[in-house]
Image: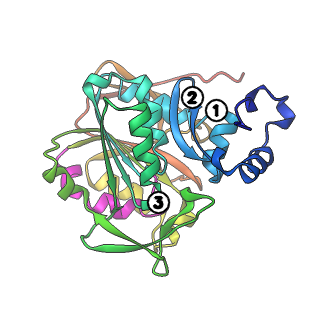
Amino acid sequence: MDPLRNFHRLPRPLRRHKVVQLATKLFPYSRHRLVQFNSGAHAFLDLQDAEARNVFVTRCFEPEFFEIATRIMARGGIFFDGGANFGLCSLGLLPRVDLEHTEFHLFEANANLEPFLRESQRLVAPHARVHINIGCLSDHEGRSRFEVNDTETGKSHLSDSGCLIASNIVLDDYLRRMAVHKVRLLKLDIEGQELAALRGASEALDGGLFEFVYCEIRSELLARYGWTPIEVVDFFRAHAFKPFFCRARDLVAPVNVRLDGDLILLLEQIGNRIPDGTDILAIHQSFSMTTEKCQRSST
């Protein structure tokens, strides 16, 4: 018996987190399951986790990210998923891209999530080129202490008091070891350690090995390590990238950015205004880039 098999046939008011939590408490075997989201993507998730449970309930995950990432990855290339968690960003791209010409590299510091990533790979992407790396993106070799949040794994983070020991991964070293010469898109969502990961990729960033970087910026998370949002933005500028706002809620004066003539993205170049809690898209200056104003509908 699967108590959640017909969950999405329930009346909408009953499709709640509490219903899922009760079902998984009474029937523990229903916690771990293959979940469909974003109209055709699948991932093997633990419904004890709040974000995983939300994906199960809503069948949706980060639509704005996928709108941008799908356009960028339309012709294939290599995708680096920094802070993969359950791998939803990578797994969500699988049905949207040409798998023959696309390669995925996932980086996750929480070793407890490796079985879920491996099971997703087995069930969903057995023939895709997927590399799962368990370790902490950093600017130095060695190991780091990692504090795990069992009920909201996406909030797990580096901490001197953490009980999990994670090996560090320096992206410049990883690129050399894996003989990767071009990364189409790097996504970073690592709870305030984004600047450390970027510093560990300084050589590759300067050399144009990364074309696009989609990066989370949360001031309260960066402050945990003594950094500020403007430091992240300035780092991109210092390494030949142009940073843009890409979330709809942040676009006050949006423009259509045309890259190399055919890729068009709705963005806004970052000035002195950085809203608290946003994502940015940084684009390497090697692209031929033109902008044109656009009229946003009020409806």
Q: Is residue 89 left or right of residue 135?
A: right
Instruction: Give how far across and how far down residue 270 sits, in percent.
Output: 46, 46
Residue at figure coordinates x 82%, y 29% from the top left: 10
Helix, strand, or loop for circle 2? Answer: loop
Q: Give the numbered dot on residue 38.
A: 2
Q: Quadrant of the N terminus?
A: top right
Q: Secondary structure at mark 3?
A: helix
Residue 59: give its label: 1
Q: Earlier in the sequence, mark 2 or mark 3?
A: 2
At label 3, the amino acid type is: Asn
According to the image, label 3 marks what residue? 112
Mark 2 vs 3: CB contact within 8 A = no
Kind of residue at badge 1: Arg
Query: What residue is at 70 percent from the left and 32 percent from the top?
Result: 5
Compared with residue 235, is residue 45 higher up or lower down, i.e. above or below? above
Chain part drawn in magenta: 189-208
At horizontal 31% and vertical 73% (from top left) the residue drawn is: 143
Mark number, residue 293 = none
